Amino acid sequence: MPQALSHIALIVAHPTRTADLLTGVFPDARIVRGEDPQDAHPEVIVEIGGLEFALIRGNGPASRNGDHIAFAVSKEEQLACAARMDALALDYQMAREDTALYFSDYDNHVFELEVVGS
């Protein structure tokens, strides 16, 4: 039986650009491995909240749908991320009485920052 998530793979047009976006939004995000253009499977690995995201070069989703990745955050963390998104001129939407913040990367992957606890 699975015990934990190993990683999440996302297909993106420009792995380094998406990695820069994620490290700009999440203060604890870090690039674990950069893109090697000589690699037959070019990808960038970003760690966020202890989980690795493999950003693999390719054609991402054609459009947004209900699929998304949700992170549990405090209200303070959510507001701090929103301020960083404002500085990056990144669009986002607040929902569910401002307990959820949704944003997308450049390739239509949707992320949620869900306020948990008080």
Image: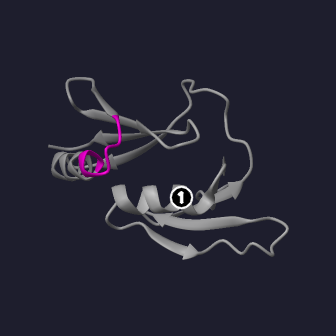
Q: Residue at x 44, y 57 (%)?
A: 22
Q: Position of residue 109 (x, y in %)?
A: 55, 39
Label 1 CA crowd tier, 10 Å (few <14, some 14–19, many 20+): some
Where, quadrant-wise, is the N terminus in this rendering?
Answer: bottom right
User: Which residue lies at the image location 59% right of the left edge and 57% below the top edge?
Assistant: 5
Percent x, y of residue 62: 67, 29
Which residue sits furthest right? 40
Secondary element at tag 1: helix
Where is residue 86, by image quadrant?
Answer: top left
Q: Is residue 61 left or right of residue 16?
A: right
Q: Residue at x 71, y 75 (%)?
A: 36
- The tally of labels here is 1
Q: Which residue is at 53% across, 66% downward?
A: 46
State how the image is colored.
one colour
Q: Is residue 32 above or below residue 13?
A: below
Locate the C terminus and report the quarter of the image it occupies.
Answer: top left
What span is colored magenta in the figure?
Answer: 85-91
* Above or below for 60 versus 14: above
Residue type (three-letter) at the residue carrying disc 1: Arg
51 is within the stretch colored magenta: no
Instruction: Answer with the quarter of the image where residue 8 lies.
Output: bottom right
Residue 24 coordinates in the image, percent (x, y): 36, 60
The residue at which mark 1 appears reads as: 17
Task: Name the foreground residue: 91 vs 31.
Answer: 91
Residue 13: x %, y % from top left = 66, 49
Q: Nearer the viewer, residue 8 or 19?
A: 19
Between 14 and 11, the one lying in front of the other is 14
